[in-house]
Amino acid sequence: MSLVVIGTVAFDAIETPFGKTDKIVGGAATYASLAASYFYNKVKIVSVVGDDFLEEDIEEIKNHGIDVEGLQIKEGEKSFFWAGKYHNDMNSRDTLVTDLNVLADFDPIIPENYQDCEYLLLGNLTPQIQKKTIERFKNRPKLIVLDTMNFWMDVALEDLLETIKMVDVLTINDAEARQLSGEYSLVKAAKKILKMGPEYLIIKKGEHGALLFHGDKIFSAPALPLADVFDPTGAGDTFAGGFIGYMAKVKTINFNNMKNAIIYGSALASFCVEKFGTEKIKNLTDFEVAARLQEFVSLSNFVIEQ
Amino acid sequence: MSLVVIGTVAFDAIETPFGKTDKIVGGAATYASLAASYFYNKVKIVSVVGDDFLEEDIEEIKNHGIDVEGLQIKEGEKSFFWAGKYHNDMNSRDTLVTDLNVLADFDPIIPENYQDCEYLLLGNLTPQIQKKTIERFKNRPKLIVLDTMNFWMDVALEDLLETIKMVDVLTINDAEARQLSGEYSLVKAAKKILKMGPEYLIIKKGEHGALLFHGDKIFSAPALPLADVFDPTGAGDTFAGGFIGYMAKVKTINFNNMKNAIIYGSALASFCVEKFGTEKIKNLTDFEVAARLQEFVSLSNFVIEQ
């Protein structure tokens, strides 16, 4: 039994009002697998890098007990590279560089020992690759979570809709939910999106938390109000990784467990933004995670007696 | 012992994507006192109208057990009138008409039988009038809640800061908290605003809920996700009224009771937006209110076991 994460493993160069980085390790699969590893110990990556990726960078992922057999290393090629600059509000950013490099013709390989996958996280990538990944598992994983973004709605909507049909949980942000459904009200948007295939929809609202929709049920998760958001890069991936990592830990797929999974994902995402890149989520102690979860409880707990 | 609400009692003409109204009864004090009356039975209004206000309009307020002795009726003058048009997103609006009329030289009169006021809600008005109202009580009320808006920060900041110093709870929205503090992070904004005088700060975030700040404590309240927001007019006033009405009901001023008060206020505000003007909050049953409170519990309740 394992949890497989597919997504980018990449280099990022990030500029925020607080500073800037040279090329640092990033990518959806990096953030998500690190996050998942705090709750589940059989996390496996499917991705691709070039030979510019250092052995020590891969070691840092392996140190979290993450299996990298499915991480292809392309000799003579370069890793995916993204450079971006965040505006002062930290909610919007400009993409400065997107060099696809090895990602341009990425064909995901699922090693034989990944076929025990029960929990599959399809990180943000082309919907075609996400779909291909699902199809390459001999048995359908018990839980498939798909993360995507507006870009794929713009350029590959049909493929995206086909892929969405095949998954259990879709995670997108509020603007994307509105775009995908054509509805402004998130309640109406969710109703339409749940008819597209997934049983569960998570709408991420950044500093406003997240909403979980399932049938007629809704759960509203708070975000931890933070004095400083240092670097939002990877927060959504970290959220998705923490979410599926918790689901793998508790095993039973239901609305109540998903509520908690969202809190676990949110807790890890709240660490992610406190430092550049993966710096913070690489080195968390169990105590820190437990304390942060407790902060979420204090933040939103209330008792109505009638 | 009583709860006094000061604010406008007015006519509104509202246009939303769902329809438009002729002049209907509105005003901060109308919404807030109606909301408070669901939880507390000694609610009293301080306001002013012209002789265009109908006896039956006042009857509808009195029917809720609200004392209108402090509602001045100016013969030969007209009531405050506001006309506005909401955009498609329902979050922004254009003001089409603001006729101050009787409000231009409003001098609040506090009837002798209002002097037992324990809970005072200063609805959105000029800070000068809000301050004058506080000063006209012989004994300082136990709890003073002030609602205000960006307009007063633009044109009467000094007066506003003086008035804020005198209150226990300040309620503003997120953009206003940022404007008042000069801080983008709401955590930093709250720290600064709490130093301006109030012990408690409520930051209203519309469809994203509300945050309560007190010392180092934070509570995050969800908003009920709604399929249709029919008319947002008065939602903030209804929230404030429900909030202070609940505080008057439970009597003890502390963080835990304020958390619940925010849920009660949010529940009433969620009704308010379902119909035009005060139509919905005029005629709620106890059962409807209790069921809505239960929806808030289901919406945000989760249990983390560690």
Image (cartoon, coloured by chain):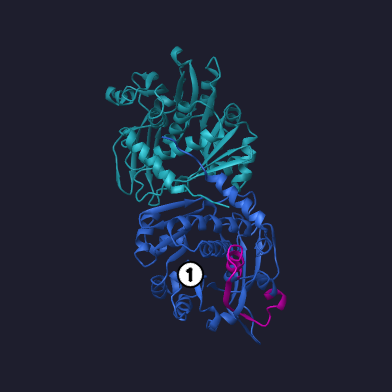
Chain colours: A cyan, B blue
Q: Work out whether residue B185 can be spotted.
A: no
* Residue A245 percent across, percent down from the top left: 44, 29
Bounds of the magenta segment: B30-58
* Residue B279 percent across, percent down from the top left: 68, 63
Of the residues shown, which amino acid type is indicated by label 1? Phe
Residue, far left: A56
> In the picture provided, is B217 more to the left or to the right than B25?
left
Label 1 element class: helix
Could you say which is closer to the camera, residue B25 or residue B83?
B25
* Residue B84 percent across, percent down from the top left: 61, 66
Q: Work out whether residue A29 can be spotted.
A: yes
Residue, far right: B56
In the image, residue A87 above or below residue A285: below
Residue drawn at (40%, 55%) of the image: B186
Q: Specify the quadrant of the image occupied by residue B12.
A: bottom right
Residue, far top: A112
In the image, residue A100 above or below residue A113: below
* Residue A51 percent across, percent down from the top left: 32, 22
- Neighbor class of circle 1 (other Cα within 10 Å; few <14, some 14-19, many 20+) is few
Could you say which is closer to the camera, residue B208 or residue A179?
B208
Q: Is residue B48 magenta?
A: yes
In the image, residue A179 above or below residue A142: below
> In the picture provided, is B88 more to the left or to the right than B255?
right
Q: Which residue is mark 1?
A: B151
Could you say which is closer to the camera, residue A229 or residue B200?
B200
Could you say which is closer to the camera, residue B181 or residue B239?
B239
Q: Is residue A107 magenta?
A: no
In the image, residue B57 above or below residue A262: below
